[in-house]
Amino acid sequence: MAEQKEKLLQLCKFKEYEVFKIYEDAGISAKNIKDRPAFQEMLVDMKQGKINYIVAYKLDRVTRSVRDLEELIAQLELHNTYLVCDKDDVNTSSANGRFFVRMLTVLSQLEIEIVSERTKFGLNGAIKSGHLPGIVPLGYKKDNNKKTVIDETTKDIVIRIFNMYLEGKSYQQISNTLNKEKVLTPKHWRDTTIMKMIDNKVYMGDYEKGKSNSKDTLVYMNVVEPIVSRAMWEEAQHQKEKNQRSYTRDRVYIFFQKLKCPKCSRIMKCKGSGGTKKKYMYYTCENCKTYYREDKIEECLQRFILELVEYDMAVKKYFLPILADKKETKTEKLDQEIDTLQKQKERIKKAYVSGIVEMEDFSGDYKIIEEKINILETKKYEKLNTNTLSFTPQQLMADRDIEREKLIKDNKLNETLKQEWNKKSKEEKQEFISKFIESMILLKNKKRRILH
């Protein structure tokens, strides 16, 4: 820039031009003239008759737009001002000069458009082969070939976030939970972070180029390995309306979004009583003036809920090993990731010993890598033990039946199930109901007692 300025000053001296002012738009593209303050200032001075010649290093430093050039030449002619470009040997003081300027600009714009098309074509090809531009989202990483692949150390966090959202938790509730558990410390989770993750199509394998809901948006399908299924991602989008209704609630309703009005089948709204007395939770239909008290609903559904609790306990204790997806026991991919992290550990250690990094930076990075290695080692252990079950389904079912009969004999089954339900927090109860019940309709009898 300094060299160009010096050459232009020498040219003005040679042509005996008196320099009125130097106009610089440092770091601003010459694509248009509207967003260039110094250029606009120069036009004002020209219109006020303060300058007769505009001297530039090259034509593309003046403008790269044919439309802007036409407008500029018209203004130059109107105010008896001429454009001189040193490098391109341009001078608009003659008709031939003005024609030559137009031809140069057309060729310059053509070159820009060709380069732009080639860049877009190359970018499209890169995206389709899994080389996504920009920052890698949580759950993914770049491999040695700069391809976006799943990061086994953070993939489960993404899955958990989607599951929590589908359970009815808001963005804020999810971020609060992750911060409380210090997930990926020192990362601080925000509700906006969760919102962007739920909206991100990359988690079902697609890449969205451009702003969402824009005409220029382009979606590339199946360009990376998905972390959640397409059905799960779509369900999360449908869940938005339900979750947003509870976003600002300061109370937890166990049967939130599950109770339908028996008369009009609309989802009943949740409402808490006011005053200083004992506060009750209500579910109301403003259209039909129907309402239910939450504690009465829980009391009415107790037998049904306890059956669900028994089922859930049995699944967790006896059937999960059978129902779990049996995946290939090959661990080469995990071994490669562990090896890469081990090498990173060694490099950080050498950098610390050599005095390149400080103790604070060394310990922080070292701890993060060790945590990732531990996660991968656990995953590897689980994979290796997937097919080495030391029991059969028949044995599990027999054990389940024996334990159940023993509790019934000792009159402890109902008490055990009640204890399991009552020890849950309201948030856990809401999550439990959300998991097992799609919707329900309750009726009242003549004595206004709730019936199933």
Image (tube, rainbow, N blue to C red):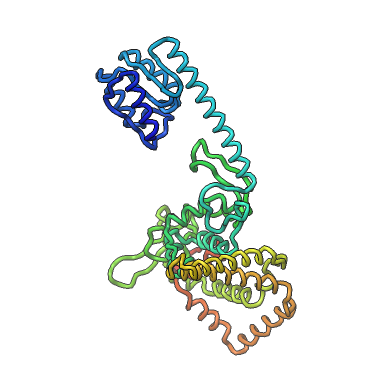
The image shows residue 65 at horizontal and vertical percentages of 45, 25
In the rendered picture of this protein, how many numbered marks are placed on residues?
0
Q: Residue at x 46, y 13 (%)?
A: 99
161 left or right of 385? left
211 left or right of 53? right
Q: Nearer the viewer, residue 144 or 283?
A: 144
Q: Quadrant of residue 315?
A: bottom right
Q: Nearer the viewer, residue 289 or 41?
A: 41
The image shows residue 316 at horizontal and vertical percentages of 61, 74
Q: Nearer the viewer, residue 268 or 392?
A: 392
Looking at the image, the residue that sits furthest to the top is: 95
The image shows residue 214 at horizontal and vertical percentages of 49, 38
Could you tell me which quadrant the N terminus lies in?
top left
Q: Residue at x 47, y 22 (%)?
A: 105
Looking at the image, the residue that sits furthest to the bottom is: 410
**Above or below 263: residue 404:** below
Q: Quadrant of residue 114?
A: top right
**Above or below 136: residue 41:** above
Q: Is residue 177 visible?
A: no
Q: Is residue 233 visible?
A: yes
Q: Quadrant of residue 370?
A: bottom right
Q: Residue at x 57, y 36 (%)?
A: 120
Q: Nearer the viewer, residue 382 or 260?
A: 382
